[in-house]
Each structure stands twice: as structure tokens, then as C-alpha cells.
Amino acid sequence: MSSRRVVITGLGPVTPLGIGVSALWTALLERRNAVRRVQAFDPSRFRSQIGAEIAGLSINDFVPKSYRKAAKIMARDIVLAVVAAHQAVRDAGLRTRCLLERGEAVGEPNLDSTRFGANIGAGLICADLPELAEVLHGASIDGQFSFARWGAEGMNNLTPLWLLKFLPNMLACHVTIVHDAQGPSNTITCAEASSHLAIGEAFRTITRGAADVCICGGAESQDNPMALLRQEIGGRLSTRNDAPERACRPLAADRDGTVISEGGGLVILEALEHAQRRGARIYAELVGFGAAHDAHVAAQPGVPHPEGRGTAVALRKALRDAGIGPEEVGLVASFACGLREHDAAEARALQSVFGPRAGHVPVMNVKAGLGNCGAGSGAIDFIAAVLAVHHGAIPPALNSRPLDPACGPMNVVTDGPRDAGIEYAVSPAYAHAGAQNAALVIKRFRA
């Protein structure tokens, strides 16, 4: 049981369904779907040509004017994180340097920057392909790449700060600089499990007294040829190019893969006494965190243990950390995104943990309209679960019928939105190609 209570005071989703809390929540309740044919590049040479994208995003709308020159060394993933941070901080009512300089807040900072930490999950950031291709071409002789020419000439055609656009820790670097977060900072790169692990570490940072406030979560863009190719080679993508809105079918009997996406979210965790002292609005309380390693996936990359052993272990640890039993859980925020083996493994993990209740506890899923954005996916799931607990409503899952018998019994909410008084919700996450698993327990806030 954690010794210091941690509450959630700010939510910053950046998704293809909308930017900010209100936009995302409304889209989920209204059953919107953002999966379309890919527009960011020509996908015609790929088997899967669909995904969920964020249009019209300008970093200048989310940072102080004095910081805009830094946008030149921001890859898309970094931009997503900085935008998410702006949304989360503003939603929490924090007066950070960014908001003060932008004129979105007045007065003095209302937190101690040295007690403001950050834990952000990141993925494999794709290099700027047109920029890199031009340089590689210049390092070639008669169409053949030359290491000698690359060392002598090619590298000189890259900007000296080129590498800073693509280091995973740069998400946290820019966020902490913009908002003057001088507390403990860390970056976690564990694919789809990254956001949950980052939120869990931030939770631990506050409970042990090393910080009063933490910004945490994750972001990633897979809206690029390299990420699409990587997922395609891994056999994880749906090829329903003629019906993109029906392509991602989590837990459904006829699911055939997921779709690429971009986005994520950052959230503000805060020590309860700190939040109350400044009169913050509190969405919910974070009361449990668990993590586990699935040796089966480590031995057979990309293949989960058929019984979801890693997910089950993480869930049990999180429940134990929260001091509750599975019978007290009123909602499961499923991580399933349409991968046949992974969806089934997660379902069996839930059956293992919840026993006879597995067919009764409500299950929500938001992936069908959003796809998989890697390190950012867990943050979106977590934010949706927090909002479900806060509002007492469960948004409907799309494309999950007919439910795969191999995933049953499971009470997937496909009608609604459904009103529900939720005391506790659990949110699991797992890396599709790795062995990392994590779970978080959210509680309705009571002073």
C-alpha cells in the first residue's frame, strides 16, 4: 500500500480524435472513428495503407515565442509530447513558465519547480527521411553507398544538431525545459508499455516524497514509412484498405490486425496535500501500480504467453499495491488493438485474475477508432479510464462484435455510452514485440 496519496489533476491527450480532454471525451462518447487512408505520405506500395493521423498541428500554438526556434530540432514525436504537456499543465491549473510567458496564466508559479518531475515514454523516432535520403545519396558512388564518402562528406551535410531530433529522451528534455520542471526526470522506451511504466514511476516518485508534482505519460508517431514497414514486417497490420473505419477490430472474431497511428498523452500526478493546498480540481486517485516481465515473449519475440502470464502478474501486483481484491474492480480499460494472439492472451489474463467475475466486469476499449500509436497508446487508454471513473460513464467500444469466443467470457461495452458508478478501474498495457507488462489502478476520488 502506498504511503502518500497521489491524485490526477490534469489530462493532456493528443489524438487523431481530438486534442485536449473535452475533444477526446466527446469523440469517444459519440463513437467517432479517425482511421482513414494515410495522407502524410504515399502508402500505395504497402499492403496496409490506412492509419489514424493528427492534422493541423502547429508547435507555435503551444510554446512561448522565445522557444519557437527549438522547433527546428523537434521530430514529430517531440512535438506531440510538448503539445500534450501544454494541455495537461493548463488542464491542471498549474502556472508554469510556459503558460506564464504565453499569457495563459497570471501571477507567480504555483508550484516549486525543484519538486516538479517528469517521466515520459518514447518510441523509436523515425528520422526525417527526405533529409536523410538526400545526404545518403550524396555519400554514394554510382548508386552504391560508400562508408568512406559518408565519413568524409556525407555527415558534413547534416546539421550539427541533427541527432537531437531523434533521441528518445528529447521528449522529456523539451517538456521539462519549456515548463521549468527541475525535479526527477526519466525516459522509458518499452514500446506499448512505455506510458504505463512512466506513469507508474512518476507515481512512485511522488509516494516516496521525491516530488510533489509529476508530468508523465508518453507519445509516439508511427505515421511514417519506417514505422509502417516495421509493423507490416511484424505481421501486425490490418489490410482492410477498402473499409478503414472497420479495420481495427479489438477482441472481435474476425480481427486481422491493428492500424498505425500517432498521438499519446501526458497527465499531471500530484500529491493530494499539494493539490488541495492550491485548490485543484481532482479527476481521480491513482492507487496501484504493477509491472512484470514475460519471459515467454523474450524467448519468442512478438508472441505473448498464451495465458497472458505477464499481464496477469502485473494486474495482480497493481491490485495488491492498491490494497484491493479483483472483486472490487468496476471497470477494465482493455489494451487490445486487434492482434489475434495478443487480444486473446489479454482476455485469458483477465479471466485468470477475475475468475468467475471475468464475464461480468465491464470492459472498455478505445483502440478501434484510434489504432496503435506505440509508446503513446497506454497514455490514451489511461486518460480514457480516468475520465470514465470521473464521469461515471463508459464509452462504447467500436468494431468488437461479434466477440471472439477465444476471448470470452468478457463483458465488452459496445452499447451506450453506459452509465456506471465506478469505484476502481484497472488499466493494463503490454509491449507487442517485447516482454514488458504494466498495470495501473484508478480510484474514484473521495477526500
Image (spheres, helix red, strand yellow):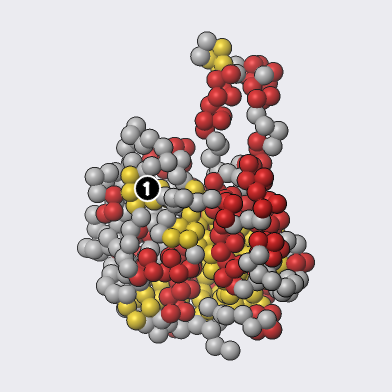
The residue depicted at 38 percent of the width and 59 percent of the height is 367
Judge whether 100 appears above or below 43 on screen: below
Between 110 and 419, the residue placed more toward the observer is 110
Q: Position of residue 12 (x, y in %)?
A: 54, 64
Viewport quadrant of the C terminus: bottom right
The residue depicted at 40 percent of the width and 85 percent of the height is 421
Instruction: Give the farthest residue toward the left.
Output: 402
Viewport quadrant of the N terminus: bottom right
Is 228 displayed left or right of 13 in the figure?
A: left
Between 412 and 37, the residue placed more toward the observer is 37
Q: Position of residue 31 (x, y in %)?
A: 31, 65
Label 1 secondary element: strand
The residue depicted at 33 percent of the width and 49 percent of the height is 36
Is residue 35 something one can see in this rendering? yes
Question: In the rendered structure, which amino acid carries the disc numbered 1?
Answer: Gly
Instruction: Give the farthest residue toward the top.
Output: 142
Q: Position of residue 160 (x, y in %)?
A: 71, 33
Between 431 and 24, the residue placed more toward the observer is 24
Between 92 and 288, the residue placed more toward the observer is 92
**In the figure, residue 121 lies in which quadrant?**
bottom right
The residue depicted at 75 percent of the width and 72 percent of the height is 108
Q: Position of residue 195 (x, y in %)?
A: 54, 60
Q: Residues within 10 Å of mark 1 (few under 14, many from 20)?
A: many
**In the figure, residue 254 lies in which quadrant?**
bottom left
Circle 1 sits on which residue? 51
Is 2 displayed left or right of 21 in the figure?
A: right
